[in-house]
Amino acid sequence: MRLKLLYTFLLITFLQTNGFGATITIISNTNWSAITTGSGIGGIPTSADDIIVRSGVTLAVDVTNGVCKSIQLGGTTAFSGNGALVFNTSTSKVTVSGIVTL
């Protein structure tokens, strides 16, 4: 019985942290390190998360290990305005495993 409960707990924990991505919408100028609505621990973005940077808004990459599934710059749909992604230092980096929409 205890083993079954342990397996159930581990499965639920895995699904909460790794199973599903979040859609993170950036609505005001902010730093990557300030994002708290991702699917990772503490709300950091993971490789399962989609990020939308709204029109007229800047997302500043201030980390060396940022990851996400996709990034869309501008609007909430493709080709609907301009959002900006800037890199604060020469070591700032984001790895996108999917699509980047400019």
Image (tube, rainbow, N blue to C red):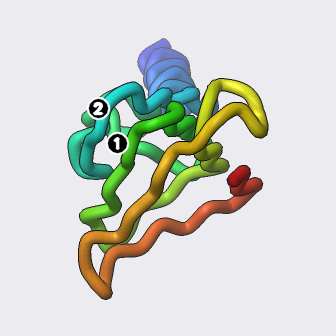
Residue that appears at 52% across and 44% down: 83
Q: Position of residue 10 (x, y in %)?
A: 48, 30
Pick the residue in front: 56 or 9.
Answer: 56
Q: How many labels does the image show?
A: 2
- What crowding class fits label 2: few (fewer than 14 Cα within 10 Å), some (14-19), or many (20 or more)? some
| Real-space CA distance between mark 1 and mark 2, rounded to the nearest whole angstrom | 6 Å
- Relative to 33, residue 51 above or below: above
Q: In which quarter of the image is residue 90?
A: bottom left
Looking at the rendered structure, the secondary structure element under dot 1 is loop
Q: Can residue 101 be seen in this view?
A: yes
* Residue annotated with mark 1: 44
Residue that appears at 55% across and 52% down: 68
* Residue annotated with mark 2: 36
- Relative to 63, residue 29 above or below: above
Q: Is residue 50 visible?
A: no
Q: Do the residues labelled 1 and 2 touch (CB within 8 Å)?
A: yes
Residue 68 horizontal side relative to residue 34, left or right: right
Going by the numbered disc 2, the residue's amino acid type is Thr
Pick the residue in front: 42 or 99.
Answer: 99
Q: Earlier in the sequence, mark 1 or mark 2?
A: 2
Looking at the rendered structure, the secondary structure element under dot 2 is loop
Going by the numbered disc 1, the residue's amino acid type is Ile
- What crowding class fits label 1: few (fewer than 14 Cα within 10 Å), some (14-19), or many (20 or more)? some
Residue that appears at 50% across and 38% down: 53
Q: Position of residue 41 (x, y in %)?
A: 32, 38
Residue 60 horizontal side relative to residue 8, left or right: left
Q: Where is residue 1 in the image (x, y as percent from the top left)?
A: 49, 12
Residue 2 horizontal side relative to residue 91, left or right: right
Please tell me the numbered disc located at residue 63. Answer: none
- Relative to 87, residue 35 above or below: above
Residue that appears at 68% across and 61% down: 97
